[in-house]
Amino acid sequence: MAVKLSTLTITKRTRRWVTLVSPISSLSCTSNIQVTPETYQDIQNANDYDSKIQFLRSKLCSDNLVRVLDNTTDLYSAVKIFKWAALQKRFSHTANTYCQIILKLGLAGNLKEMEGFCQNMVKERCTGVEDALVSLIHSFVKHGRLYEAIRVLVNMILGGYKPSIAVFNGILGALVEENKGFEDVLYIYKEMVKAGVVPNVDTLNYLLEVLFEAEKVDIGLDQYKKMNKKGLQPNSRTFEILIRGLILRNRVDESVSILDEMFQLGCPPELRFYICIIPLYCKENKLEVGIKLFKMMRVSNSVPDPFIFVDMIRCLCKNLWLDYAVDLLEEMIEHDFSPPSDVLTDIVHGFCKLGKIKEAIAFVEDKHVRETLPHDALLGSCCNAGNFSIAKDLLEKMCVRNIADSSSWNVLIRWLCEKVAIKKAFELLGRMIVSSFSPECATYSALVVGNCRLRKYEDAMKLFHWVHIKCWVLDSNSYFELVEGLCGAEKYIEAIEVFRYMSRNKCYLQSSLFDKLIRGICEFGKVDEAVRLHSVAYNSGTPCANSTYASMMLGLYKSCNRKALSLLLSQMLVAGFTLDVETYCILIQNLIDQNKTKDCALFFNIMVNEGMVPDTETLYNLILCLANHSQLHLVLASLDGIVSHCENLNSETYNILINGLWKEGDKEKAHRLLDLMLERGWVPNAATHKLLMGSCSMEANSRELAYETPNERDHVSNILAEGLGKL
């Protein structure tokens, strides 16, 4: 019985045919007819469709239909042919024909229509449907169409079929490999549970891997601990996932515990395990663990990966196990692996750190090392050990053997410049040029350092200008010494020039030196230039410090540039800096000058709450400003916290406070401050004395003194009398 697809009826559409056959002479008459590439494609597809239908009318069978569908590139035509076949008498679609059209639609990304055919296929229960569905899943996975594979899997389960564990693992493995995320993997895992398929160790490995990638490490470890309850034995891949995941998340000690469990279970590591884990432990400087695994790998007759040799040798050199490192290097060479230059350099550095210069020289000679980098390392170590003559002889041998290059000469020139032997450095430079090696950026960097250490800043700047012309970039230490020296010599114009050039080339200064530069520029009276340099520093990565902002703010305050000061404060806060005592004092002084008493009080209160106290001058000016505007009550709470133990309050400040509080009606606090003032041995000035004595006289006559007991009143009077006697 033929399959009737009532829900997938063929739609008819009328095509417009254009006759293109005409005499050459009549082409001008038909120039108004526009035939687009799309029209040609439609004509071709229509002809293709008609010819294929004509072929199938007399030879319609499953195999022929599959071949026709396979050769039909136009998806729309393929669907039409498939639907036409379904309407023919004495023909029924098979699993193969369904499989062909589903695959075409899926690979084209037509998920909705693909799923419709998939549901029909399952519903018809053609012979071989289950195998066809599995084949579709494998094909989609192979072509990276994972969501199409998942939809086929879901429809397969809904149709009552039970996919094997291999089918589920195939999709899971592809999802993990393409980093599709935890949710997709969990979805497949749940479908597996619904289908009653029991997971195996590969399934759990995929789950562990995606859990670690999703930073659900503890859940992953919990799943690992439950493997025995599920009747699963962890394998080499399991431990590789766990150990790698823990190391990459800085849980190295836990990874070592898991490794011990692996040994206790007797799980044999595979070569993949060694290749993955040994370098990780070497990079974490877990040398003992790395050596243990490396020995196990050799016992298992596995040939080490060249990268394992490299990581092991570098770790051994870092821990100064030089004999073992050399043995491993020889083994690496025996396996026909060429050691990279940086590995040979590490061995040379290791010998030199142990003070074994002769052994290092013997190493490069015995191993017939031809690379320049290890020899340069040896040159530098000889110089640093004070063996310049040995380094010089070694350089000559390198030149004879054609190993030396410009960098080799620069090692010696740099050392001479740093030791302020600039004359010898120029002599060596002359020999370098005679030997057909041109000075390069590193050469000029060395000469700049040498001139700076001799305080020959004009010569250093000439070298810098030559570098500028060449569009070269000095090394960071050379810039540091040049800028620092120029600042020390108060040559700020030159220092600004150097800083701008190095910043354009993404070189940065340490925050301490940049602070020194900005402070000097501000003191030099070029605060606007300092602010512009701050923007340059931000773009080049040079860090700022609180003191740098304070220097600029002080300069802007002195130049009365209040708008720029406010803008700089905003930039400072946006950058995440906190205000220090110096910055607060500058801001408060600025607000005092503008008579912004409320803002002054606000900043002062915030400052005190953060545990800071203004300097004596700022505190005096603040209190004077607030007292003149009768606004001392705005800061009373903060003053109570500092007045009893603050060393920044002098007698003059006390007098202003007492008078101000009295005028604002807070006579009790004024009396208390007077007591503190007298206890410190300070005598109130005439205005304060007159104010308080007049008050006491009036209160005595009216018997409304503020003190509660006669003893307290007598005590204050006695202190006043004693203080006045000193006048």
Image (cartoon, grey):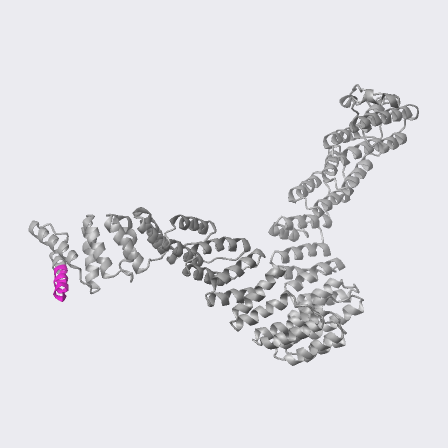
Q: Is residue 295 visible?
A: yes
Task: Residue 148: give x, y in percent of width and height.
Answer: 74, 37
Task: Residue 197: give x, y in percent of width and height.
Answer: 73, 42
Task: Residue 577: give x, y in percent of width and height.
Answer: 45, 54
Question: In terms of image quadrants, where is residue 607?
Answer: bottom left
Q: Nearer the viewer, residue 652 or 514?
A: 514
- Tell me the quarter of the image containing the C terminus: bottom left
Query: Which residue: 61% across, 56% down?
Result: 249
Left or right, 497 with respect to 594, comes to right
Residue at the far right: name it: 58
Q: Nearer the viewer, residue 475 or 290?
A: 475
Taking the magenta stretch, the answer to whether it contains residue 726 is yes
Q: Specify the principal SS of the magenta part.
A: helix
Q: Which residues are magenta?
A: 715-727
Q: Nearer the viewer, residue 600 or 293?
A: 600
Left or right, 312 with respect to 215, comes to right
Taking the magenta stretch, the answer to whether it contains residue 589 is no
Q: Is residue 291 visible?
A: no
